[in-house]
């Protein structure tokens, strides 16, 4: 047990360090891209004025349309939050386990942490927090959300709110023999998403949300990520707000050595992007009694 405790500490510290480094790189890259995009937008608006287009009038129209979009978004958000007050129906894990074939191991998560590219210098995107923690009992479902809003004109890459979040769940497995093992985690989503954008003739508005499921295994080294997008909704003219209540199993295979502990990492990725004033994108797995996300179990055989 002491050996596993030391291995657990080593692996989780490496994950935290790696994620933190990745997040910092993305934040700095996003800041640079936003500065360059704003410079291009200002030049573009200046050019429009030079060819006789009333830029002030266009900006006034955009402000009015943005205000209308903000009001629509607030109404939609309130509606979706109201629908999230009652828990959604959930298939009992105990019932599912009754169908598991002989020889299959059902693992529960032993660790969870969340990371995001949220930047204190960026007012156009945000996310909730989950501190890294060991899970002493099974399940480990958590409340989590992220969002992005657009700003200004939106053209030439300006006015973009963008955020990527990762919620990592870790499992320990000790294979009895050396062979290829099937690793089938259950990704559970209970929540809603909002994607709103109203692209006009003189602006460039769009919005997108994406929800992904990732799996990797570490034993001696990292074996490689497998991933699937379970939700991906986007457009430049869109007004979609729906609940997303689903369970998704993913199917993976890894060659593991017998007798040595292996770390199975299952990651939920949440991405939101909005461009141009009045555009919004939100993944909400936190509001009310109904909303949460987790990887409550993983089948290995």
Image (tube, grey):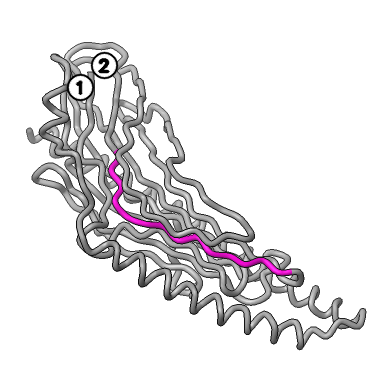
How many marks are shown on the rendered structure?
A: 2
In front: 205, or 31?
A: 205
Tell me how far mark 1 sits from mark 2, CA to CA: 6 Å
- Whether 41 is drawn above or below 104: the answer is below
**How far across and how far down the image is residue 246, in percent?**
32, 43
* Left or right: 220 as drawn, with respect to 65: left
Relative to 152, 86 lies left or right: left
Q: Quadrant of the N terminus?
A: top left
Q: Residues within 10 Å of mark 2 (few under 14, many from 20)?
A: some
Q: Residue at x 30, y 20 (%)?
A: 182
Residue linked to disc 1: 260
In the picture, measured across the screen, residue 217 lies left or right of residue 298, that is right
Disc on res. 200 = none
Secondary structure beneath label 2: loop
For the magenta stretch, what is the residue range?
187-200
Q: Are marks 1 and 2 in contact (CB under 8 Å)?
A: yes
What residue is disc 2 on? Answer: 257
- Main secondary-structure element of the magenta-colored stretch: strand
Q: Picture quarter containing residue 274?
A: bottom right
């Amino acid at each position: 047990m002491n050996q596993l405790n030391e291995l657990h500490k080593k692996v989780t510290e490496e994950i935290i360090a790696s994620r933190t480094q990745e997040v910092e790189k993305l934040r700095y890259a996003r800041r640079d891209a936003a500065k360059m995009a704003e410079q291009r937008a200002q030049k573009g608006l200046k050019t429009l004025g030079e060819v006789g287009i009333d830029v002030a009038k266009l900006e006034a129209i955009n402000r009015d349309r943005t205000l209308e979009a903000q009001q629509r978004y607030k109404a939609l958000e309130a509606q979706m939050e109201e629908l999230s007050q009652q828990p959604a129906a959930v298939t009992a894990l105990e019932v599912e386990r009754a169908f598991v074939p002989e020889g299959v191991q059902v693992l529960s998560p032993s660790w969870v942490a969340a990371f995001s590219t949220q930047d204190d210098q960026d007012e156009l995107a945000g996310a909730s927090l989950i501190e890294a923690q060991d899970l002493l009992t099974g399940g480990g479902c958590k409340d989590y959300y992220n969002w992005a809003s657009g700003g200004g004109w939106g053209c030439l890459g300006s006015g973009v709110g963008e955020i990527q979040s990762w919620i990592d769940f870790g499992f320990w497995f000790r294979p009895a023999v050396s062979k290829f093992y099937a690793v089938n985690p259950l990704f559970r989503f209970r929540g809603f998403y909002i994607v709103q954008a109203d692209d006009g003739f003189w602006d460039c508005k769009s919005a997108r949300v994406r929800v992904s499921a990732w799996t990797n295994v570490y034993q001696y080294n990292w074996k490689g990520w497998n991933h699937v997008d379970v939700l991906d909704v986007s457009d430049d003219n869109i007004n979609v707000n729906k609940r997303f209540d689903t369970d998704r199993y993913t199917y993976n295979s890894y060659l593991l050595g017998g007798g040595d502990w292996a770390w199975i990492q299952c990651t939920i990725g949440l991405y939101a992007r909005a461009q141009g004033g009045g555009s919004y994108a939100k993944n909400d797995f936190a509001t009310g009694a109904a909303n949460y996300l987790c990887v409550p179990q993983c089948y290995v055989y």
